[in-house]
Amino acid sequence: MKLVRLPQRLKTISEYIDYNDTVIDVGTDHGKLPVYLAQINPKRVIMATDISANSLKAAFLTAEKYALTKNIDFLVTSGLKNIDLSLFNTIIIAGLGGETIVEILSDIKWQKNGRKKLILQPQSKTNKLCRFLYNNHYNIIDIKTILDNKREYTIMNCSKGG
């Protein structure tokens, strides 16, 4: 089986995900990361979401190309609205602005959903996101800055809840 090719940014994010993690990819866009995760572990529970129906269709087509549409649930939604978070232990929010990530995280009722791993990759306003994480008692486990296609990205492995 030929694995979907990930840019370095997404490959680095995937390195934080354990084999049996159940995953939501918020703002999935093209869907390459969920497809890759399904290829690594076809029994993994995966949901790909996006606020844009067109982006989610692109993600579905990526999954279709690799015959993995049955391995991934697709949902048009804003952030984590209308999702049963108790089914997932890992939340990826990558490629969105730091202020948007703050809005999404602010809406979650952590005490009801158990401990979660969060993998965050803001496209902008990283300082605002970091301030929010610190002020709201998130556990920042690791932060990496990588270069991908001549652009610098910050990727954070965090936890919250429980």
Image (tube, grey):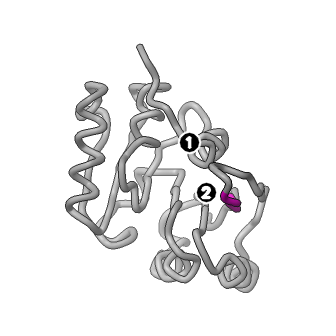
Amino acid type, mark 1: Pro
Which residue shows up at 28% across the image and 57% down it?
55
Q: What residue type is labelled 2?
A: Ile
Q: What element carries label 1?
A: loop
Q: Nearer the viewer, residue 19 or 50?
A: 50
Q: Is residue 119 left or right of residue 68?
A: right
Which residue is depicted at the point 21% across and 51% down? 57
In this view, the residue in front, 162 or 90, is: 90
* Callout count: 2
Query: What residue is pinned by disc 1?
Result: 7
Q: Quadrant of the C terminus?
A: bottom right
The disc, 1 or 2, on the residue closer to the chain's N-terminal end is: 1
Residue 71 is drawn in which quadrant?
Answer: top left
Residue 55 lies left or right of residue 156; in this view the side is left
Q: Nearer the viewer, mark 1 or mark 2?
A: 1
Of 62 and 15, nearer the camera is 62
Magenta segment's dominant SS is strand
Q: In this view, does 152 lie above or below 44?
A: below
Is 77 colored magenta in this rendering?
A: no
- Residue 122 placed where, x, y %? 60, 68
82 w.r.t. 41: above or below: below
Quadrant that contains the N terminus: top left
* Residue indicated by mark 2: 119
Q: How crowded is mark 2: few (under 14 residues within 10 Å), some or many (20 or more)?
A: many
Position in image of residue 83 (x %, y %):
33, 63
Q: Are marks 1 and 2 in contact (CB under 8 Å)?
A: no
**Extent of the magenta region:** 151-155
Mark 1 vs mark 2, CA separation in Å: 16 Å
Confirm whether the magenta stretch covers residue 153: yes
| 4 relative position to 145: left or right | left
Tag 2, which secondary structure? strand
